Image (cartoon, grey):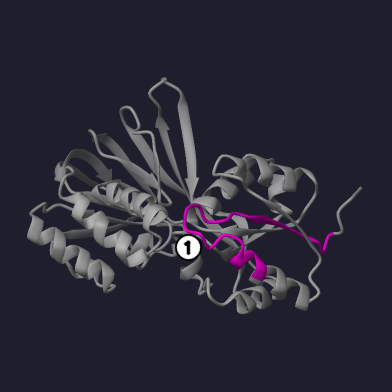
Amino acid sequence: MAVEISRWGILYCPKSGIGRGRKQWDRVQKALDERGVLYDFVQSENTDSVERLMRMLINNGYKTIIVVGGDSALNDAVNCLMDVEQQVRDSIVFGVIPNGVLNDFARFWNFRENDVAQTVDWLIRRRVRRIDLGCIRYTNKKGEKCHRYFLNCVNIGLIADIMNLRRQTRSLLGSRTLSFVVSLLLMFFHRLDYKMDVKINSDTIRRRVMTMCIGNGPGYGQTPNAVPYNGMLDVSVVYNSKVTQVLAGLWLLLTGRFLNHRSVHPYRTREVVVTEARHAMVGIDGRLISTPVGSYRISVETEIVNFLMPA
């Protein structure tokens, strides 16, 4: 049976290991019901089920798909959306109600986890904008050619390591602040720089790099001027690996002044080619991927998906 065109398909991705479980969904459901929104919802059991459920919503004909989740859930959903034919993709709009460990992309648009009613009101007004996606193309350990799209950013090096530690510790500890502090402490037992060979525009970087962020969005504060609708990627490359410089850089990151650090070198480009980044972890929208083998390429695809933005 065909789904009404006005009916939303909602993919609810509960937080894992934090104990807040159903409370956010209860708030979402209340806001939807009070406003008379027609919807059906499915709930993911784990990270592996998000793409399967997203595909089910697409195949069942939902034209408005809302993800109640964080950056990683959004990443899974948009990658599933990019797997379908363009004609189908162009007929679908997707939106977000933040409910994750990391909600950086949602916060960029002023969607707040603690203000569900406002978010639902904005989504109802249906202000649609075509937005860009970044894409990383790489070879995995099996020799297979792979690609992955991203809404927010790709991190290479130390910050990818910290983001992974923060996600793991937050799942255990619950507190965002406490998990960040613990992640910083654990950081000192990890590698602080990596030998890299990177081409950005006409510049070739061949030296030890602490971390590099390629942002289609704000990049967790590392690419604060990036916007997902100008056809460009912002890049921040950080060289200095002294512990005191790392701490100073993290303070500037937390206070929104990351680009003011003297070791941060910003770029704006349509493509980044990483010829070598040996042993450097790679994170996509806050989640690690298997370290690519050999060179890989990161580019931007312009105005490729429909997104519900605030009114």
Q: For residue 127, which quarter of the picture?
A: bottom right
Q: Position of residue 32 (x, y in %)?
A: 73, 72
Q: Is residue 301 magenta?
A: no
Front residue (pair 14, 202): 14
Could you classify mark 1 by the number of other residues whose Cα lies within 10 Å: few (under 14), some (14-19), or many (20 or more)?
many
Front residue (pair 73, 89): 73
Residue lying at 41% horizontally and 61% vertically, measured from the top left = 174
Query: Does residue 260 appear left or right of residue 154 in this picture?
Result: left
Q: For residue 64, which quarter of the picture?
A: bottom right
Q: Position of residue 247 (x, y in %)?
A: 15, 62
Q: How many marks?
A: 1
Residue lying at 33% horizontally and 52% vertically, measured from the top left = 163
Front residue (pair 35, 154): 35
Query: Does residue 105 appear left or right of residue 291 in this picture?
Result: right
Residue lying at 80% horizontally and 46% vertically, measured from the top left = 60
Mark 1 falls on what kind of element?
A: helix
Q: Is residue 8 magenta?
A: yes
Residue 169 seen: yes
Q: Which region shows up in magenta?
A: 5-26
Q: Position of residue 18 (x, y in %)?
A: 47, 58
Front residue (pair 297, 204): 297
Residue at the spot of label 1? 105
Instruction: Say which amino acid is labelled 1.
Output: Phe
Q: For residue 45, which quarter of the picture?
A: top right
Please say if 110 is above or below 249: below
Query: Does residue 30 appear left or right of residue 138 in this picture?
Result: right
Residue lying at 42% horizontally and 53% vertically, measured from the top left = 171
In the picture, the quarter occupied by the C terminus is bottom right
Residue 222 seen: no
Please say if 129 is above or below 148: below
